[in-house]
């Protein structure tokens, strides 16, 4: 158990809908990262927050957004869902952010199925 | 980080044999190289990592080697056991953001 929690574990929804995925980082960690894992694209970095502020963006679609709250939990919002958004979504956390890369610890993931 | 290539995509070994997975990267600024193990239905688990000022690091049956000149690093698992069966991902980073390889499915047969 990494100490990172994600809810829900599974999510099934229809095209065009909007969903929210939630992540709580390990105790003491200030950074939260979101990743998408699909069979053809592997593990893709989406976005990074540190202590409530966005620090880096990866291959995140404009239909997707995220935020990190004062209690450090984070939410990933996916809207206007398409079939191709079906994937595993992982959250990871680390202690810090800066010139040195910190170890990232992953949560168990949320499996999103868009029908 | 930019691209990272990982080979092989699948690897089958007999219990007790060694397994080696290799990754190459292109960004000369990369300085952090983790390896993750992902079991079915679970999130990736950090198993070992190495930074650019070190050439090799060991932890019991697993080791990672880094060749910065050639821009490649490898995961070595000795005395493999059936519970080592999983997908292994290499990663690289120069500044906070990790880029991952496509993964290697390791199957250890009893």
Image (cartoon, grey):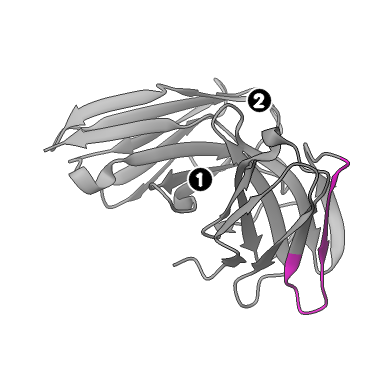
Q: Residue at x 59, y 40 (%)?
A: A37
Residue A14 shown left or right of residue A68 in the figure: left
Determine whether, in the image, residue A47 is placed left or right of residue A12.
Answer: right
Residue B50: assigned label = 1
Tell which of B64 and A48 is nearer to you. Answer: A48
Which residue is the site of mark 2? B3
Which one is in front, A28 or B33? A28
Of labels 1 and 2, earlier in sequence is: 2
Residue at mark 2: chain:
B
Q: Position of residue B69 (x, y in %)?
A: 57, 23
Query: Is residue A70 located in the magenta-colored stretch of the structure?
Result: yes
- Graded by Cα atoms within 10 Å as few (under 14), some (14 to 19) or many (20 or more), the crowding at tag 2 reads some
Decide if residue A24 is on the left or right side of residue A109.
Answer: right
Viewer can see residue B93:
no
Using the image, tell me which numbered label, if any, was put on residue B12.
Answer: none
Q: Are marks 1 and 2 in contact (CB under 8 Å)?
A: no
| Left or right: A104 as drawn, with respect to A73 | left
Whole-number angstrom distance, CA of label 1 to CA of label 2: 18 Å
In the image, what residue occupies the spot 51% across and 59% down?
A108
Secondary structure under the numbered disc 2 in the rendered image: loop
Of labels 1 and 2, the one closer to you? 2
Specify the subunit that label 1 lies on: B
Discs 1 and 2 carry the same chain letter: yes
Helix or strand or loop: what does disc 1 sit on? strand
The x, y position of residue A39, in whole percent, is 54, 31
Task: Indicate whether residue A56 is drawn in magenta.
Answer: no
Quarter of the image holding residue B105? Answer: top left
What is the span of residues highlighted in magenta in the rendered image? A62-74
Instruction: Determine the residue positioned at 47% across, 53% down.
Output: B46
Q: Quadrant of the N terminus of chain A?
A: bottom left
């Amino acid at each position: 158990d990494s100490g990172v929690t994600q809810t829900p574990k599974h999510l099934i929804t229809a095209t065009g809908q909007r969903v929210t995925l939630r992540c709580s980082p390990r105790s003491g960690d200030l950074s939260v990262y979101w990743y998408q894992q699909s069979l053809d694209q592997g593990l893709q970095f989406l976005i990074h927050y540190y202590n409530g502020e966005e620090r880096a963006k990866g291959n995140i679609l404009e239909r997707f957004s995220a935020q990190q709250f004062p209690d450090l939990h984070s939410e990933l919002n996916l809207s206007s869902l398409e079939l191709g958004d079906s994937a595993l979504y992982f959250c990871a956390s680390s202690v810090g952010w800066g010139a040195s890369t910190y170890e990232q610890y992953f949560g168990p993931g949320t499996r999103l199925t868009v029908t | 980080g930019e691209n990272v290539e990982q080979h092989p995509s699948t690897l089958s070994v007999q219990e007790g044999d060694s397994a080696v997975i290799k990754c190459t990267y292109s960004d000369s600024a990369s300085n952090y190289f983790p390896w993750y193990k992902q079991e079915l239905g679970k999130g990736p688990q950090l198993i070992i990592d190495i930074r650019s000022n070190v050439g090799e690091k060991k932890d019991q049956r697993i080791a990672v080697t880094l060749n910065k000149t050639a821009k490649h690093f490898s995961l070595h698992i000795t005395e493999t056991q059936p519970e080592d069966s999983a997908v292994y991902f290499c990663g690289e980073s120069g500044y906070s953001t990790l880029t991952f390889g496509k993964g290697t499915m390791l199957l250890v047969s009893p």
